[in-house]
Structures are given as C-alpha cells and as structure tokens.
Amino acid sequence: MFLNYFKYKASYLFNRLLKAYFRMLFQTLLLKKESKKWKLYIERLQHPVGVPYAMLNAPRWNTHAFIASAGPVTINENIAIDFSEINMLCSSWTFILYKLPANVTSKVISCLDDSSLHHKVNVERGSYSIVLRCYELRYPVELPELIIDNGKVIIEKRLILDKVPVYPDKIMGKESRFYSFVHYYLHYAFRQETKSISSNLEYEYLPVGNPETTFLFGYFNRNSSVYVDISDRAGDYMVFITCYNESSFPIYSERIPVYGIDLFKSSLLTVNGTYLIRIIPLVKGLTPDVLKSCVKVKVIDGISDMNADDVRQVAVQN
C-alpha cells in the first residue's frame, strides 16, 4: 500500500512538471509566428510535440468530433463569422475563442444561440486561438471565412472534400508505460475513492472541451461492460462514449443510439481504465443537472447482463 501511495504522489508531481513543460514548449512554438490558415486537429497532432501535448493537457481524447483551428492571430477589435453553411452540415457545432498565452476561454458561439448565424464579436486586444468543433459533419464542407478587425486580416475559407479522421488511428488501443505512470495518480484516486489530489476530481479528469458539453465519467476493471440507459427527452441531445486504458489512450468509441434500444451495452472491456460519456445538447436550456438525470450509467464486472430497470436506479454523477 505504501509503495502504491508513493507512486501516486510521484505520478502527480511528475504529471504537473511535464504539463507545465509541454505547455510552455507548445506555446513557445505556437507563438513564434501567426497562423492565418485553418488547420485540422489531426494535422496539428503531426507536429513532434502534438501527441505529447495532447496526452498531458487534454488526454481524454475526443474520438467523435471534427475539430479545426486557426491562429494564433492578433485581434485588435473584432472578428466576424458566418456560420450558415456549417449550421446546415452538422448536428451540432461550437466556435470558441481562446485568449493566449493563458488559453482562457474568451467567447463561445454555438448552434444553440438564438441570434443570427452571422456574428461580429468584439474582443480585447490580444493574441487568440480559434477552435471550431462539429459533430456529425457532412462532406464536402467549407470552413467559414474569418474577418478580423473589419477586414484588415482575413482567414480564408478552406474546402474539405472528403471525410477526414478525427484522431490518429495509431492511438486506438495504444499502451505506454510512460503515460501509464503519468496518469497513474488519477487511476489511483478512482480506485481509492480519494480526492486528495485535488478538491475537484472533475478538474483533474475532464478535458478542456466544449463548455456546453455535459460529462459523466468513472472507472472500470478489466472484463467489464458499461451499461447506459437513456430515459427521457432523447431527441434533445446526442450521447457519445469513449473508454480509455490506464495510459489514457482510447480503446473503445461509440455513439450511443437514443432511439430503438432499451439499453446500451458497451463491448467487453478487457483492461482497467475509465469511461467518459459526452452529452451534447441539441436544444437550448438543458442544464447539466437535467441532462445527467436523463442518462443513467452502471459498470458491471464480468459478462452478466442487467436490465434497464436495474440501470435506471443508478446515475453516475461525479
């Protein structure tokens, strides 16, 4: 027990040191020059520090969303965007401005906004990273033109003709002793049900993602299955599940159907790890508490089946 606790403490400190180092390295490389072109997330991951940066700063990979980004770019006054085409070609989209170098969320625009699809956003002068996240995107698609400071800078449209992968195939099911140690402190906390690493386990575990997404997460032992029951307002949101091994690489990814089944059951998970369920609202006004009450989750060891009534009695809301 003492050895495991020592490993847990060492993992936490090592994670913090590496996270600070890679954040500084990535920001230094990123801020060397401005980038006035759209780049796909999978293209950014091809940089030598791309995957290490993701594994330290956003290790709960989103294996479902199309993600494109632009910047860093200096914005002195405002940015104008037309989301008309994107809005027609996907089920859900979110546009986020992050102010650098702290990477703080400055502005969020989404398909849930009541206003027009034509937006002109005033911002504080500074350097910004721009991220567009889409679910169930249909191709071909043209990423929107970004008009900065009334046309002084323009990030041109980008045409994507064919469907592109949203994550590198090589990461699915990958094992790594190094990353297992880097993330050991989290898995120890899950198993021991301790929050001594932080007053907020959500802060430690959840990725930096769409602010409108509601998350459910938890730990599973090898040879387990995750059961999910969607009990109410099924047409108002989408549900996705990703399971990760102890290295935080994905091992299982699925969109959970909201119609046509009584109960969703994942495939048999043959390693220890964690699951992360993303609930994406499709209508305005659905709070995280409401969404969590609609989706019930239970992890069952072994191959025993359970029915929907059993699952409905348990809602995992960390």
Image (spheres, rainbow, N blue to C red):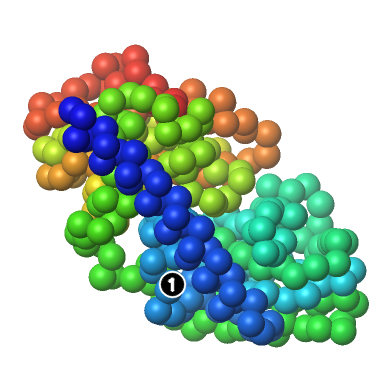
Location of residue 47 with respect to 59 vertically, above or below:
below
Residue corresponding to mark 1 = 50
Secondary structure at badge 1 equals helix
> Is 42 placed left or right of 35 in the picture?
left
Location of residue 260 with respect to 91 vertically, above or below:
above
Location of residue 277 with respect to 151 vertically, above or below:
above
Instruction: Name the residue located 67 percent from the left edge and 74 percent from the top edge.
Output: 72
Q: Quadrant of residue 24?
A: bottom right
Relative depth, front residue between 301 and 195: 195
Q: In the image, what residue type sits under mark 1? A: Gly
Label 1: few (<14), some or many (≥20) within 10 Å?
Answer: some
Quadrant the C terminus occupies: top left
Q: Residue furthest left?
A: 303
> Is 204 placed left or right of 88 in the picture?
left
Please count the marks in the image: 1
- Pinpoint residue 315: horizontal percent, then vertical percent: 39, 22
Relative depth, front residue between 31 and 110: 31
Residue 69 can be seen in this image: yes
- Pinpoint residue 29: horizontal percent, then vertical percent: 56, 78
- Pinpoint residue 20: horizontal percent, then vertical percent: 51, 58
Instruction: Name the residue located 89 percent from the left edge and 69 percent from the top edge.
Output: 77
Instruction: Name the residue located 49 percent from the left edge and 83 percent from the top edge.
Output: 161
Location of residue 53 with respect to 43 vertically, above or below:
above
> Is 6 placed left or right of 209 in the picture?
left
Quadrant the N terminus occupies: top left
> Is 28 placed left or right of 179 in the picture?
right
